[in-house]
Image (cartoon, grey):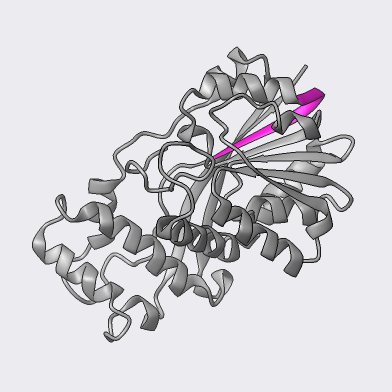
Amino acid sequence: MNTPHGIHGTHGHLGHGRASGSDIAMARMLEADAEVLAPYLTRLTGWLAEVADPAPARILDLGSGPGTGSLALAHRFGPARVTAVDISAQMLHRLNKQAAAHGVAGRIRTLEADLDAPWDEIGAGGPYDLVWAAAFLHHAADPARTLAQAFERVRPGGLLAVTEMDFFPRFLPEDIGIGRPGLESRLHAVTNTRPPRDWTGELMNAGFTVEARRPFDIRLDRTQAGPALPRYARICLLRLRSHATDVLDADDLAVLDTLLDESRPHGIARRNDLSVSTTRTTWLARRP
């Protein structure tokens, strides 16, 4: 994934601590992401509904975080039961609250577990018709072992959907009215240092048949993105700011801090020129 270390947090992955302030910050970013990018989630789950035959009745969400994927899948696949697995009790607590608010609490089971350990308890709800792994696999200590365990838990003919963010979302025009033009491009250049990961080979090595590798190009203006866009943009830029202290020059850092100051006239919260653009790629694989 084309992001700095830790930029997407650690949901589902052992070794970075359990419920904490960072979990809460990550949960808020993921929830804002799902709210703003709802049209994309609708497209993605709609595509899965087209290729899944019959519709999945048992779904496993790996590294579920606060459950944005679990909720989208529960809404898309009406009677289905979803098992959401994460190592963070805080994430799962938020998921349970959201499931109750959305009227799907009876169909989402949460399980606090380390996905780098054996999946004995996780397998109890299977075999699964659909395994969902969104922005998770790159966090696994041993992705090959994780995919092998997923292969064992999905039924023959069942599907695995692996989704990764190709680059962190962008929100600003080239010229923001303060500082040198191109601030956001420079910020991404110094923080997005990892090339996107291609999981095709690893999926095939685990025994899956890769049926599709589909990029989703996401471009929404402020109206399309809705009222959560300024909040989402600020959360994401704050996260990038935390990685930019030693790599972005002082003038750019000062402008970035002005953008992040909600009281300033040029601040994110007061801007009318925000949009969001990013791409996400989904690999659709089937167990023969």
Q: Where's the C terminus, which quadrant? A: top right
Q: Quadrant of residue 57?
A: top right
53 lies above or below 4: above
| Residue at the image position 39 percent from the left and 61 percent from the top | 236
In the image, farthest residue toward the left: 250
User: Residue 185, relative to residue 234: is it above or below?
Assistant: above
> Which quadrant would the N terminus be assigned to in this image?
top left
Position of residue 123 measured from the top left corner of the image (x, y, whole percent): 74, 29
In the depicted view, which residue is nearer to us: 153 or 74? 153
User: How far across and how far down the image is residue 96, in percent?
Assistant: 69, 59
Q: Is residue 150 left or right of residue 10?
A: right
Q: Residue 264 is drawn in which quadrant?
A: bottom left
Q: Main secondary structure of the magenta part?
A: strand
Q: Is residue 98 left or right of residue 28?
A: right
Q: Residue at x 41, y 46 (%)?
A: 167
Image position of 1 with respect to 210: above or below: below
The spot of residue 5 in percent (x, y) is 33, 41
Residue at horizontal 57%, vertical 32%? Answer: 115
Give residue 257's position: percent from left, percent from top: 22, 71
Task: Write the residue at 68% across / 64% down.
Answer: 98
Residue 246 shown in magenta: no
Per the rendered image, the range of residues in magenta is 154-163
Of 168 and 139, nearer the camera is 139
